[in-house]
Image (tube, rainbow, N blue to C red):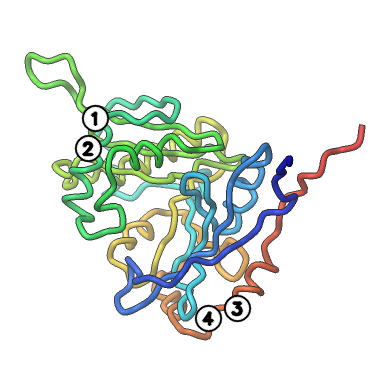
Amino acid sequence: MRHTLPLAPQFYVTAPQPCPYLPRRMERKLFTALQGENAETLNDALSKQGFRRSQNVLYRPACADCNACLSARIRVADFKPSRSQRKAWNRNSDLKRQASSPWATEEQYALFRRYLDSRHANGGMADMDIFEFAAMVEETPVRSRVVEYSAPPEPGSRHRPLAAVSLTDILDDGLSMVYSFYEPDRARASVGSYVILDHVEIAREAGLPYVYLGYWVPGSPKMGYKSNFAALEIYKNGTWQDIGDPEDHSGETHPLSVAPIAEQVARITLPDTRPTKG
């Protein structure tokens, strides 16, 4: 028997589990498989509607009593770095960028482990082994790049050690920073902000209007840094809008801010992937 993929993507909901961002809350995700010849088209379309990619899955938070996870992106044309961000840029000017096809290395994984152990020791990725890490990087059905940032070599060595890495998707309207990590010893130099600033420059050079940063969560210290970037938009109530005053979004943690799952799915706009007639 020959099996074919469904013409329209099927959406599912995960079981509730503790929220990694806000205390005493439960998290659910709405997700669909990302596969087949139309994977890039679907990734482009759903990224514009607040979805994120993880390997071969597109997901968006769909919690029962909270709507705080808001997809965020920077408008490249309007972005101007703050004074502290200009300092971060200068402090990390010794880093060298190299972009390549998504391929995992032992050096990347060693840096990833140091990053997790230092900043997210109790997070959902804390137990990820090298094979799971390789799957995260390499299992992608869309245009992706691994962007590495290496530091100057130590005296007597020619090897430039990794200082930061970003797994980045190339969308039709921007760059999506799927996951990034960095050397914990460089945290005080704001290397994480530097990687975002450099992606803004990459997008500017490529003529791409946006850099997608993932989710900004009002009230979460882990995600607060994203609101420090100028020209930041959030996806809220089915549209992209300027973030404005971050304090204005605290109401997203109210139970009545959430639409039923069936209504959320009905509002999703899917790309037309039907073949054109010759």
Decide: few, some or many residues near mark 1? Use Cα within 10 Å; few <14, some 14-19, many ≥20.
few
Q: Amino acid at mark 3?
A: Pro
The crowd level at tag 3 (other Cα within 10 Å; few <14, some 14-19, many 20+) is: few
Q: Are marks 3 and 4 in contact (CB under 8 Å)?
A: no
Q: Are marks 2 and 1 in contact (CB under 8 Å)?
A: yes
The residue pinned by badge 4 equals 257
Q: Nearer the viewer, mark 4 or mark 1?
A: 1
Location of mark 1 (residue): 107
Q: Position of residue 158 (x, y in %)?
A: 17, 14
Q: Residue at x 10, y 21 (%)?
A: 154
Asked if marks 2 and 3 touch (Cβ < 8 Å), the reply is no
Q: CA distance from mark 2 to mark 4?
A: 39 Å
* Residue carrying label 3: 260
Give the CA distance from mark 3 to mark 4.
10 Å
Q: Is residue 154 left or right of residue 11?
A: left
SS state under label 1: helix
Instruction: Tell me what residue is drawn at x 25 percent, y 41 percent.
Output: 112
- Which residue type does callout 4 highlight? Ser
Report, in whole angstroms, how far the alpha carbon at label 1 lies from the one at label 3: 44 Å
Q: Secondary structure at mark 4?
A: helix
Circle 4 packing at 10 Å, graded few (<14), some (14-19), many (20+), is: some
Q: Earlier in the sequence, mark 2 or mark 3?
A: 2
- Where is residue 108? Give x, y as percent: 27, 33
